[in-house]
Amino acid sequence: MSRTVKILATAVTAAITLAACGGDGGGGAEPPPTPSASAPATGPTASPTAATYKRLDKAALTQALLPLKSMPAGYSEAPDEEDDGKDKTFCNYRQPHTAKVEVSRSYQKGGGLNTEVAMVTLRQFGSADQAKASFDKLAEVLQTCRKDTLNGQQVTYALMNLPETGEASLGVRIEMDNGTVLQGFALVGPVLISTGAGGLMSADADVVADLLGKQVDRYSAAALA
């Protein structure tokens, strides 16, 4: 792997794990409505409820990650990269809760300046309420978090429109010197799902949206079985 590609892969991994950290604390005011957040279904046709989803052990949660065959054409499995930004969150915010189990998988497409990297992540919390509080805090922070520093370089954030999926969802565009990362988040029961894709030359929001929808469906099928 070339140094340029390694830098990109590390940057994408760090960017996609921005919402993974946290601990006791957080809280804050009631979050404002998220532009792309979908309201939970109500009424007699509402199915399933957040309480319906069972919590999975690490092996089962790993099995629920999107496999290679679910990726767009041209992607292959990527080796794990050391994540220098594993303790970083958007604008250094503290999450109200920490995920109990977290699993992820990385993919790579192309080479050289045309390299694209994608990643899918599942973060399972102690309860659906904890997952929702974590999503709400993330949505609140991204209303005002616009500029930050990641691995020593300046980055800018902007909310990004994505199709509604899960109980609530949002997207964010991350611009950095080494490329652009697009990331989507979805809340499903006790799990916060994230998918991201980035490249030196470009990043495709359609890929992120497609992967997010597929990952929501695959996790739901596993957790409702």
Image (cartoon, helix red, strand yellow):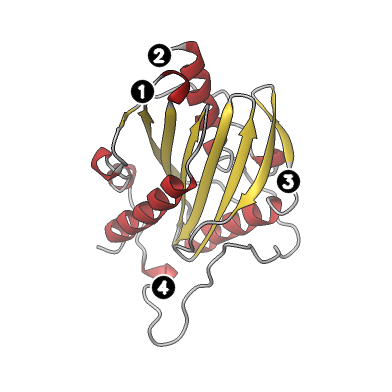
Q: Is residue 47 placed above or below 78 in the rendered structure?
A: below
Amino acid type assigned to the residue bearing label 2 in the image? Met
Please tell me which residue lies in front, 195 or 115: 115
Instruction: Single out the residue that lies furthest toward the bottom.
Output: 44
Residue under numbered circle 2: 1
Q: Which x, y percent locates residue 142?
A: 68, 50
Label 4 element class = loop
Q: Which mark is residue 40?
A: none
Label 1 element class = loop
The quarter of the picture where the C terminus appears is bottom left
Q: Residue at x 38, y 48 (%)?
A: 211
Gap in Å between the C-alphas at discs 4 and 3? Answer: 31 Å
Mark 1, Cα crowd under 10 Å, few <14 / some 14-19 / many 20+, is few
Sooner in the amino-acid sequence: mark 4 or mark 2: 2
Sooner in the amino-acid sequence: mark 2 or mark 1: 2
Q: Which x, y percent locates residue 87?
A: 60, 31
Residue under numbered circle 3: 145
Tell whether label 2 touches label 4 (CB within 8 Å): no
Residue under numbered circle 4: 49
Q: Residue at x 58, y 43 (%)?
A: 19
Q: Nearer the viewer, mark 1 or mark 4?
A: 1
Gap in Å between the C-alphas at discs 3 and 1? Answer: 31 Å
Gap in Å between the C-alphas at discs 2 and 1? Answer: 10 Å
Tell whether label 1 touches label 3 (CB within 8 Å): no
Mark 3, Cα crowd under 10 Å, few <14 / some 14-19 / many 20+, is some
Gap in Å between the C-alphas at discs 4 and 2? Answer: 44 Å
Q: Which x, y percent locates residue 120?
A: 41, 42
Label 2 element class = loop
Q: Which mark is residue 79?
A: 1
Sooner in the amino-acid sequence: mark 4 or mark 3: 4
Res 190 → quadrant: bottom left
